């Protein structure tokens, strides 16, 4: 294995070259902070989101899924504190007028025009995208694209309680888009203006929040393991009170060693009854929870694990990106966990000008495609080139149909990580996986 350090550029250029992620609106010169997922990117993204849903919802008895609207009544964002406090400090260069987030630059010198001491006092910039609902553009029609999926969960807490009667502790989970008008989107998809979150609000008895916090902390480590992230690259950062979000009494940031440094991958926060109490205050509706035996009535407290899909993708790609030597040449490939690979198998005939090989390979392809879906056909170039192409996108196995296949039904299976080839039957592949 090469010890060359992976750069953000390595990841971004692989993503573009091989159809994982493109700049949003690229054909028109792009739109800053937006990204489009290509065929392989959307497959990887869905595999990550499906794994999350399986681990945190389907495999558990205490979780309920929802899919709430992105547009919500403006009172949601007034009650949650986002209208007043979801801000970042913005500074503007007095010389070139470039704008930056104050905490991301050295304000002694403008990073764009290099002039010294041109920045005035910062002003607070609200990061929510504002819009109007319906044809009338006035105060009452204001709405926002949600900056977190969490509020769509809180506003459905009562609906879930009244329809499913869950015992506390229980969680409500959601995957969906979130939007933030970031002052300086940067570092590939790490800080985008439109991104996807996977969030859980876990409702607990107020005096028992610590045990659920710990349970979820451990579940997060298991999640990172399933993503194939080495334990040594995950770091828990206990966030100090002055740096915590306005609603949090305790937060752990799970940081990952990204190519551009150790940065937040996801967060775990104790939100107390902040959100439910605010909904009660603004809507006038009770958020009380009554135990089934009627012995206790309380407003639950909330533990929130919050995951960003794009950051998970970046962490997965960073961990999987591997350079080794094959036949004296550098080979860059994605050592993805098999359950995340966008393509599970690639099928080829050894020679594309032999109709009998192509027909047999098509048969094998059809069977695998029906069973696994994520199967690719590739008959371009020589076998070595096909292997390299599949290595680069992380396909665990390439299956080649040759003349022996026609004789004895066996196929060649080439392993991405070891580059070793072995012979087996289609039936064996289908039973093994
Ligand atoms: N509901 C809590 C919440 O939204 P957050 O720390 O602001 O907390 C949670 O965001 C996660 O969402 C982050 O850990 C990160 O993974 C992801 N995230 C936040 N802002 C992002 C952005 N601009 N681009 C990509 N991902 C982002």
Image (cartoon, rainbow, N blue to C red):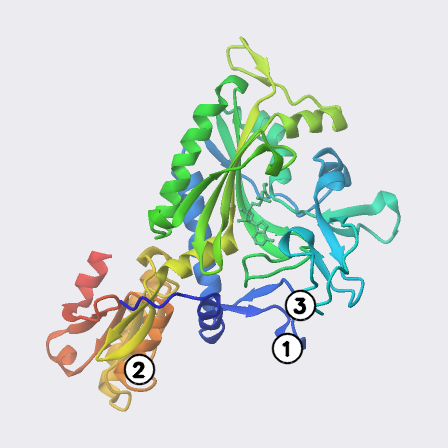
Question: What quarter of the picture does the N terminus occupy?
Answer: bottom left
Q: Secondary structure at mark 3?
A: loop
Looking at the image, which residue is at 63% across and 40% down?
Answer: 152
**Looking at the rendering, in which quadrant would you find the C terminus?**
bottom left
Which mark is in front, 3 or 1? 3
- The correct choice, above or below, for 308 with respect to 375 in the image is above
Of pointers 2 and 3, the one earlier in the residue sequence:
3
Real-space Cα distance between discs 2 and 1?
29 Å
**What label sits on residue 31 in the rendered view?**
3
The local secondary structure at tag 2 comes to helix
Q: Looking at the rendering, which quadrant does residue 283 occupy?
A: top right
Residue found 62% across the figure and 35% down from its top: 242
Q: Is residue 259 left or right of residue 378?
A: right
Up-down relation of residue 173 to residue 107 (above or below): above
Q: Which residue is mark 1?
A: 27
Q: Mark 2 packing: few (<14 Cα in 10 Å), some, or many (20+)?
A: few
Q: For mark 3, does the 10 Å Cα neighbourhood hold few (<14), some (14 to 19), or many (20 or more) residues?
A: few
> Residue 41: horizontal and vertical position, in percent?
47, 64
Residue linked to disc 2 = 385
Note whether 266 is above or below 110 in the view shown: above
Asked if 359 appears above or below 167 in the picture, the reply is below
């Amino acid at each position: 294995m090469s010890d060359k350090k992976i750069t953000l550029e390595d990841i971004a250029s692989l993503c573009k070259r091989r159809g994982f992620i493109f700049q949003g609106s690229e054909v028109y010169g792009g739109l800053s902070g937006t990204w489009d997922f290509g065929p392989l990117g959307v497959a990887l993204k869905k595999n990550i989101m499906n794994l999350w849903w399986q681990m945190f919802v389907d495999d558990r008895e205490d979780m309920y899924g929802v899919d709430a609207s992105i547009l919500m009544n403006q009172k949601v964002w007034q009650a949650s504190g986002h209208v007043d406090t979801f801000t970042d400090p913005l500074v503007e260069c007095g010389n070139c007028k470039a704008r930056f987030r104050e905490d991301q630059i050295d304000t002694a010198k403008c990073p764009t025009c290099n002039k010294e001491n041109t920045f005035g006092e910062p002003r607070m910039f609200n990061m929510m995208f504002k819009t109007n609902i319906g044809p009338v553009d006035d105060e009452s029609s204001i709405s926002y694209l949600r900056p977190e999926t969490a509020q769509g969960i809180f506003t459905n807490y009562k609906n879930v309680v009244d329809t499913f009667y869950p015992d506390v502790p229980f969680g409500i989970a959601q995957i969906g888009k979130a939007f933030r008008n970031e002052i300086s989107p940067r570092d590939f998809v790490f800080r985008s203006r439109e991104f996807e979150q996977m969030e859980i609000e876990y409702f607990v008895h107020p005096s028992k929040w610590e045990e659920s916090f710990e349970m979820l902390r451990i579940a997060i480590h298991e999640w990172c393991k399933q993503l194939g992230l080495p334990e040594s690259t995950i770091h828990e950062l206990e966030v100090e009170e002055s740096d915590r979000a306005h609603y949090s009494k305790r937060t752990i940031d799970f940081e990952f060693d990204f190519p551009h440094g150790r940065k937040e991958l996801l967060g775990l926060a104790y939100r107390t009854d902040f959100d439910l109490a605010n909904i009660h205050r603004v809507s006038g509706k009770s958020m009380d929870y009554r135990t089934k035996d009627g012995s206790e009535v309380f407003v639950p407290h909330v533990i929130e694990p919050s995951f960003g899909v794009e950051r998970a993708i970046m962490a997965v790609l960073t961990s999987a990106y591997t350079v080794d030597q094959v036949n004296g040449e550098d080979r860059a490939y994605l050592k993805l966990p098999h359950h995340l690979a966008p393509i599970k198998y690639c099928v080829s005939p050894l020679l594309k000008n032999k109709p009998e090989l192509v027909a047999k390979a098509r048969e094998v392809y059809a069977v695998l495609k029906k069973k696994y879906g994520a199967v690719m056909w590739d008959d371009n170039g020589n076998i070595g080139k096909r292997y390299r192409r599949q290595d680069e996108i992380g396909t665990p196995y390439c299956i080649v149909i040759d003349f022996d296949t026609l004789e004895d039904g066996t196929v060649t299976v080439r392993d991405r990580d070891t580059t070793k080839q072995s012979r087996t039957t289609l039936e064996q592949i289908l039973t093994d996986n």
